[in-house]
Image (cartoon, grey):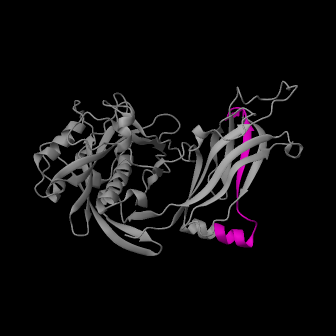
């Protein structure tokens, strides 16, 4: 498999030094006691915001303890690069623009609550960045009205571009319709996987998924039951969905199995955050399925009315169930418009709704002993998800550094299918599902 070129532009190492005035005005916001923030804009990309740490004005260098802090990232595919490089040749040079504010983020009565301190513009030359890293700026910049007087505020930042090649996959149909999955490279579409959607019954895996892994021991069903909920099943539920990913030889290389049914909370027609449904993402190993990750999903209340989700990595502990899982992503997708499910462990605020972390959950060691299991760094993967009522053919991007074999890529494809199917599983129970998702036709509603 050959990857597609991508470039990651990262902005980090932010800090702000503001000289102390001899006669401070009452209206001045003092950053030592009030937060500062900035708005970061790259042409045609969504605006991103980040908090700026304040350091004492007598410091002469950037604090070493914050040298890996990222504030924002921009991901550019080949078409983005071609467009931006071409425009920078024939028009004004491309710039990254940063507006710096003192005061808290947000608005009051429609008016921004922060006070503009100054603006910074960093020129970018993206030519050749798909094959080599470039640092555009690393150091202090004077900002504010007194830049020429030597008494201005000082803003520290690092702006760089790095190659971030990715494998790109596209479902040729909706996951519940058992589609093919193509690898995309430019204008070339090459089939690499097939998906098989089926229903896993409660009396045993008497379906096509269980037959797809020949000689599957009973221990695989033990894994499924141990991760599933033992709660009393209500009459109205969505359960037993399963999708298996096969390579072109027909061998199963990954699977997603619904282990906790999606049920409405008492007195409502929606799956609640306090009682989510869940999927187990599985990989083959030693003649059986081994758990790799767990996806929980629910329907958010309020104005967002979106699909809430949480994805956890399950450490391989050789059969032990006591080790803590590690949260890699937790966010919300619009139920109407859809969006992107993303695992990005670079910036804490990357312009998306996502705010992924890498922290332990559950019983076990919560200290440094878990970090060897958290092998994922930077951008990991993303999957496009369409909103309810739309024909969803998920697109999946996976960072090359996280794919060492076919099973690695297939696991992310299975996860993307589970996220897409969760949009249907969390559909209001007052609405009907399409027939492919209903094992019993009387449960369509």
Give coordinates of residue 386: x percent, y percent.
Answer: 45, 54
- Quarter containing the N terminus: bottom left
326 in relation to 164, above or below: above
Drawn side of residue 332 relative to residue 232, left or right: right
In this rendered view, identify the residue nearer to me: 250 or 109: 250
Give coordinates of residue 82: x percent, y percent.
Answer: 60, 70
Q: Residue at x 57, y 43 (%)?
A: 69
Drawn side of residue 198 relative to residue 150, left or right: left
Q: Reply yes or no: does residue 248 show up in magenta.
A: no
130 in relation to 402, above or below: below
Give coordinates of residue 230: x percent, y percent.
Answer: 21, 32
Q: Residue at x 46, y 34 (%)?
A: 301
- Residue 396 appears in the rendering: no
325 in relation to 166, above or below: above
What's the magenta region?
84-109
- Quarter containing the C terminus: top left
Quadrant of residue 109 in the image? top right
- Residue 336 appears in the rendering: yes
Q: Reply yes or no: does residue 86 show up in magenta.
A: yes
The image shows a total of numbered marks equal to 0
């Amino acid at each position: 498999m050959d990857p597609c070129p991508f470039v990651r532009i990262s902005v980090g190492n932010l800090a702000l030094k503001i000289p102390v005035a001899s006669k401070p005005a009452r209206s001045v916001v003092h950053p030592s006691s009030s937060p500062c923030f900035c708005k970061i804009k790259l042409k045609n990309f969504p605006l991103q915001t980040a908090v700026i740490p304040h350091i004492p004005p007598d410091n002469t260098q950037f604090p070493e303890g914050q040298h890996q802090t990222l504030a924002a990232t921009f991901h550019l595919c080949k078409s983005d690069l071609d467009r931006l490089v071409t425009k920078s040749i024939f028009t004004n040079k491309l710039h990254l623009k940063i507006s710096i504010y003192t005061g808290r983020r947000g608005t009051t009565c429609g008016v921004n609550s922060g006070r503009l301190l100054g603006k910074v513009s960093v020129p970018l030359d993206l030519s050749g960045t798909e094959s080599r890293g470039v640092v555009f700026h690393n150091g202090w910049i004077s900002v504010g009205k007194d830049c020429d007087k030597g008494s201005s505020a000082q803003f520290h930042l690092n702006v760089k571009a790095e190659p971030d090649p990715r494998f790109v996959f596209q479902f040729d149909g909706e996951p519940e319709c058992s589609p093919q999955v193509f690898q995309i490279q430019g204008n070339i579409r090459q089939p690499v996987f097939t998906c098989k959607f089926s229903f896993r019954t409660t009396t045993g895996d008497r379906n096509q998924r269980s037959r797809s892994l020949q000689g599957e021991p009973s221990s695989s069903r033990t894994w499924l039951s141990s991760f599933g909920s033992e709660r009393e099943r209500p009459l109205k539920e969505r359960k037993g969905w399963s999708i298996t990913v096969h390579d072109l030889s027909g061998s199963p290389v990954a699977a997603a199995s619904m282990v906790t049914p999606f049920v409405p909370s008492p007195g409502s027609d929606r799956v609640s955050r306090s009682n989510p449904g869940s999927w187990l993402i599985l990989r083959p190993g030693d003649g059986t399925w081994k758990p790799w990750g767990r996806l929980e999903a629910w329907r958010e209340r309020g104005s967002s009315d979106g699909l809430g989700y949480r994805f956890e990595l399950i450490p391989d502990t050789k059969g032990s169930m006591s080790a803590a899982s590690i949260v890699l992503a937790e966010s919300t997708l619009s139920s109407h418009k859809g969006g992107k499910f993303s695992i990005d462990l670079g910036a804490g605020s990357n312009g998306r709704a996502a705010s992924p972390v890498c922290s332990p959950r559950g019983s076990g060691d919560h200290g440094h002993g878990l970090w060897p299991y958290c092998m994922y760094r930077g951008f990991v993967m993303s999957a496009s998800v369409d909103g309810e009522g739309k024909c969803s053919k998920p697109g999946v991007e996976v960072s090359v550094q996280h794919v060492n074999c076919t099973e690695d890529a297939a696991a992310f494809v299975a996860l993307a299918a589970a996220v897409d199917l969760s949009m249907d599983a969390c559909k209001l129970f007052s609405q009907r599902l399409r027939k492919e998702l209903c094992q019993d036709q009387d449960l369509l509603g």
